[in-house]
């Protein structure tokens, strides 16, 4: 007999962990959470936030290369977490409420229930935040705290921002910062353990809820259907040799992330019919938007050698953010910097740029990137990595914003407050002065902030390119939903981890509402 549960959640990541934990709060509801990676319980390299950069291209990373880029960095790799907690177990834990304007625009696209008025209470529900303000939650499972100002180079940088006309401005106040800088908030405990979705939502209940089964090392092969009704998922079991059908009495929720969720849907017959036919996959639902609309936050790198010794301890090495606009009249920032107190030559060293072991950097990233890419099947074998093609800088807007960011980074670090810290500019270097020279450097060496999204996006019924409705239901089939960053109609302007947790909260609410009908 196949094991059967009320709900099966495929993917124990940033949203999936939330969905499974919230649904299983009802002792009469059985939930199975399936995660392809291992557990994070007692795994110190994963749990200790300061070690997050060790996880890149490690055994805890699916490590997806991009397709050759016409105008971007073809060496770039998308880190996608292969561990319970997903990318919340793998990232730098920068915690942002989404800009009010982004969420209201989601709702304005024809998605009732997704405005700031709807989602801000979910942030409050999930957080235990140390920042002032009645809008913040104090009793939620996710510890969010403000980075302490212990890095002297960071302190100097914030003074330099003020000297350059960028004021000190608090984040997560409920008002969107369009021009300001400060220490980040992070989702991490005071002891340095990350407050990932798994740590916050699952660890407290593992082994305590008999109605919640969490299985790690179990890889989804394809979803199963009775006609157009989703009945469960076929998986490769923990021994990596045998298959098992896990059935869902009520619904299946796919929470495998912006790369693996569209891949699983396409392997299951939900996607562009013409492409599926090319792999001899039977079409369950012709959904041309699956795997389309891939969005990301691309980032450049401006790096300096440091005149003084940099810090040897940090919460997560990327503790300050700078927001601004490159044009007048914008209601959201289109440019954001992360300040790193460590060198970051991941994409520059191969091109011969100098590096250092005692330096700092600013990484201008495009918060409202207009380039759009795709996720496509490579083969019909579930074990094969899909083709990920972000098409970086295919829209000239993105290179314009990032080039502006390089010039602004230089202006900030040239201020008197940074004089005792800033040594030689290592990348792109003082010889890169024209837009063409800076642009050539950026296209060769840019990185990503690792925020792929929107590949199975929500949209109104009139939008044939939107695979999901406003209740996260997959159009063309029954009893199947998607809850992760792939569902975003467009990528929010800030780090999306906490918003992805809020999507998990929202999905659990929707599932409970529909179960009562």
Image (spheres, rainbow, N blue to C red):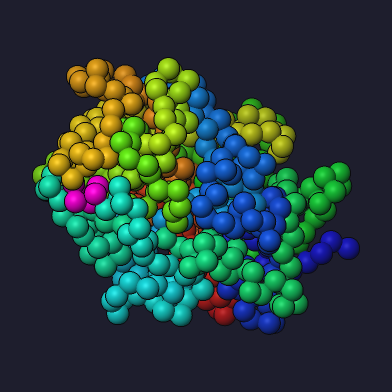
Q: Where is residue 435 in the image (x, y as percent from the top left)?
A: 21, 22
Asked if residue 480 lies left or right of residue 492, the reply is right
Count of numbered tags: 0
Q: What stretch is highlighted in magenta?
A: 156-161
Image vertical order of residue 215 relative to residue 136, above or below: above
The N terminus - image quarter: bottom right
Residue pictured at 68% horizontal, 62% vertical: 41
Is 441 rendered above or below residue 229?
A: above
Picture coordinates of residue 112, whole percent (x, y):
36, 65
Q: Nearer the viewer, residue 333 or 157?
A: 157
Q: Residue furthest right?
A: 1
On the image, the x and y values in percent for residue 166 come to 16, 50
**Which residue is more in the foreground, 63 or 371?**
63
Left or right, 203 with respect to 388, comes to right
- Residue plotted at (34% across, 53% down): 151
Q: Does any portion of residue 117 appear in the rendered image?
A: yes
Classified by dominant secondary structure, the portion drawn in magenta counts as helix
- Residue 178: % across, % down: 20, 53
> Which quadrant holds residue 59?
top right
Q: Can residue 397 be seen in this view?
A: no
Q: In the rendered view, does 385 fall on the left or right side of 472?
A: right
| Residue at point 64%, 64% (across, down) | 251
Q: In this view, does 391 lie to the left or right of 277?
A: left
Is 249 part of what is drawn in magenta? no
Of residue 49 and residue 267, the one placed in the foreground of this image is 49
């Amino acid at each position: 007999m196949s094991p059967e549960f009320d709900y099966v959640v495929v993917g124990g990541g940033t949203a999936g962990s939330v969905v499974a934990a919230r649904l299983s709060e009802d002792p009469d509801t059985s939930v199975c959470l399936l995660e392809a990676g291992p557990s994070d319980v007692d795994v110190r390299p994963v749990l200790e936030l300061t070690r997050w950069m060790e996880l890149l291209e490690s055994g805890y990373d699916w490590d997806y290369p991009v397709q050759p880029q016409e105008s971007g960095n073809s060496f770039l790799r998308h880190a996608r977490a292969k561990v319970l907690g997903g990318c919340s177990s793998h990232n730098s834990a920068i915690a942002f409420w989404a800009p009010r304007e982004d969420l209201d625009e989601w709702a304005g696209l024809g998605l009732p229930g997704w405005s700031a008025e709807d989602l801000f209470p979910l942030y409050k529900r999930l957080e235990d935040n140390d920042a002032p303000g009645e809008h913040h939650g104090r009793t939620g499972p996710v510890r969010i705290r403000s980075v302490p100002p212990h890095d002297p180079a960071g302190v100097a940088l914030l003074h330099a921002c003020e000297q350059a006309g960028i004021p000190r401005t608090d984040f997560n106040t409920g008002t969107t910062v369009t021009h300001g800088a400060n220490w980040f908030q992070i989702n991490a405990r005071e002891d340095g353990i990350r407050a990932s979705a798994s740590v916050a939502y699952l660890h407290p209940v593992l082994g305590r809820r008999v109605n919640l089964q969490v299985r790690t090392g179990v890889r989804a092969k394809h979803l199963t259907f009775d006609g157009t009704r989703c009945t469960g998922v076929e998986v490769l079991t923990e021994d990596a040799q045998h298959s098992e059908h896990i059935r869902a009495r009520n619904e299946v929720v796919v929470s495998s992330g912006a790369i693996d969720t569209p891949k699983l849907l396409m392997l299951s017959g939900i996607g562009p019919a013409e492409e599926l036919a090319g792999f001899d996959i039977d079409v369950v639902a012709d959904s041309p938007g699956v795997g389309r609309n891939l969005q990301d936050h691309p980032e450049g790198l401006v790096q300096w050698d440091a005149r003084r010794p940099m810090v040897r301890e940090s919460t997560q090495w990327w503790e300050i953010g700078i927001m601004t606009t490159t044009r007048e009249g914008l209601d959201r920032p289109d440019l954001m910097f992360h300040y790193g107190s460590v060198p970051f030559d991941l994409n520059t060293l191969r091109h011969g740029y100098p590096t250092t072991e005692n330096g700092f950097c600013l990484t201008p990233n495009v918060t409202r990137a207009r380039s759009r890419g795709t996720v496509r099947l490579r083969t019909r074998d579930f074990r094969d990595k899909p083709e990920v093609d972000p098409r970086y800088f295919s829209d000239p807007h993105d290179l314009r914003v990032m080039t502006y960011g390089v010039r602004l980074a230089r202006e900030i670090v040239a201020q008197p407050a940074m004089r005792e810290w800033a040594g030689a500019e290592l990348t792109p270097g003082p010889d890169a002065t024209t837009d063409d020279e800076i642009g050539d450097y950026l296209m060769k060496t840019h990185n990503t902030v690792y925020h792929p999204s929107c590949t199975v996006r929500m949209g109104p019924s009139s939008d044939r390119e939107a695979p999901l409705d406003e209740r996260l239901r997959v159009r063309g089939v029954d009893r199947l939903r998607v809850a992760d960053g792939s569902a975003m109609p467009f990528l929010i302007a800030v780090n999306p981890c906490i918003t992805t947790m809020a999507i998990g909260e929202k999905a659990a609410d929707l599932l409970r509402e529909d179960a009562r009908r």
